[in-house]
Image (cartoon, helix red, strand yellow):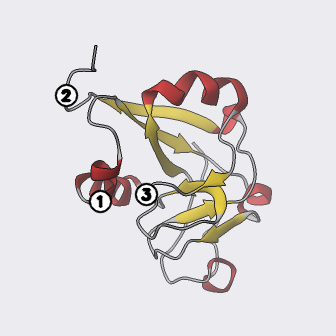
C-alpha cells in the first residue's frame, strides 16, 4: 500500500509521526457492513479516554493497536467474538479529516472511510466460545 507524507505536528496536534496505513480494531461481526459501506463516524464507546467525539477511531500503527488490545481495549471487547484488525489506507485528501483524540495514541477520522480504503489485516479468535 502507498504511504502518504507524514502529517506535521501542527496538523495532528501531537508529536507522534503519522503515516498511512492506520489500524482500526472491531469485532468480526461488523465486517460485512464494513465491506459494504465502509467505516462510519460514531461515538467512541470503546476508546480508552471515554471520548464522546464522533469519528472512526484509528491507531497510528499495528504495534500501538496490539498494545491496546493486550491492555485496555481487550477488556472492552466481548470475549465471545472474534476481533478484526483492519488496515486503513487514507490518501492525502482524506488525511485532512484526521485528528488526534484525547488519548495521544489514537486518531479520529471525521467522516466515512470507503470500503476500498480498508483491508482485513487479520482476525483474532474469540477468547471464549460464543454463548448459545
Residue pictured at 24% horizontal, 59% vertical: 71
Residue 4 visible, this orientation: no
Residue 8 position in % (x across, y down):
64, 80
Residue pictured at 54% horizontal, 51% vertical: 21
Specify the quadrant of the image occupied by residue 128.
Answer: top left
Query: In the structure shown, which secondary structural element does the residue marked by tag 1 occupy?
Result: helix
Residue 75 visible, this orientation: yes
| Crowd class of label 3 (few under 14; some 14 to 19; many from 20; radius 10 Å) | some
- CA gap between label 1 and label 3 equals 17 Å
Specify the quadrant of the image occupied by residue 32.
Answer: top right
The mark lying in front, picked from 3 and 2, is: 2
Closer to the chain start, of discs 3 and 2, is: 3
Query: In the structure shown, which secondary structural element does the residue marked by tag 2 occupy?
Result: loop
| Crowd class of label 1 (few under 14; some 14 to 19; many from 20; radius 10 Å) | few
Q: Which residue is mark 1?
A: 72
Q: Which residue is mark 3?
A: 61
For the C terminus, give its image quadrant.
Answer: top left
In the drawing, does residue 57 fall left or right of residue 90?
A: left
Query: In the structure shown, which secondary structural element does the residue marked by tag 3 occupy?
Result: loop
Q: Which residue is mark 2?
A: 128
Amino acid at each position: 500500500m502507498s504511504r502518504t507524507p507524514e502529517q506535521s505536528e501542527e496538523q495532528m496536534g501531537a508529536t507522534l509521526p503519522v503515516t498511512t496505513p492506520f489500524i482500526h480494531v472491531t469485532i468480526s461481526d461488523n465486517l460485512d457492513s464494513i465491506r459494504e459501506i465502509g467505516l462510519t463516524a460514531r461515538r467512541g464507546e470503546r476508546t480508552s479516554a471515554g471520548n464522546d467525539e464522533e469519528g472512526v477511531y484509528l491507531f497510528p500503527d499495528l504495534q500501538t493497536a496490539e498494545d491496546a488490545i493486550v491492555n485496555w481495549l481487550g477488556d472492552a471487547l466481548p470475549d465471545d467474538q472474534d476481533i478484526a484488525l483492519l488496515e486503513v489506507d487514507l490518501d492525502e485528501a482524506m488525511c485532512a479529516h484526521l485528528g488526534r483524540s484525547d488519548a495521544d495514541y489514537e486518531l479520529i477520522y471525521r467522516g466515512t472511510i470507503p470500503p476500498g480504503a480498508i483491508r482485513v489485516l487479520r482476525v483474532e479468535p474469540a477468547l471464549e466460545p460464543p454463548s448459545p
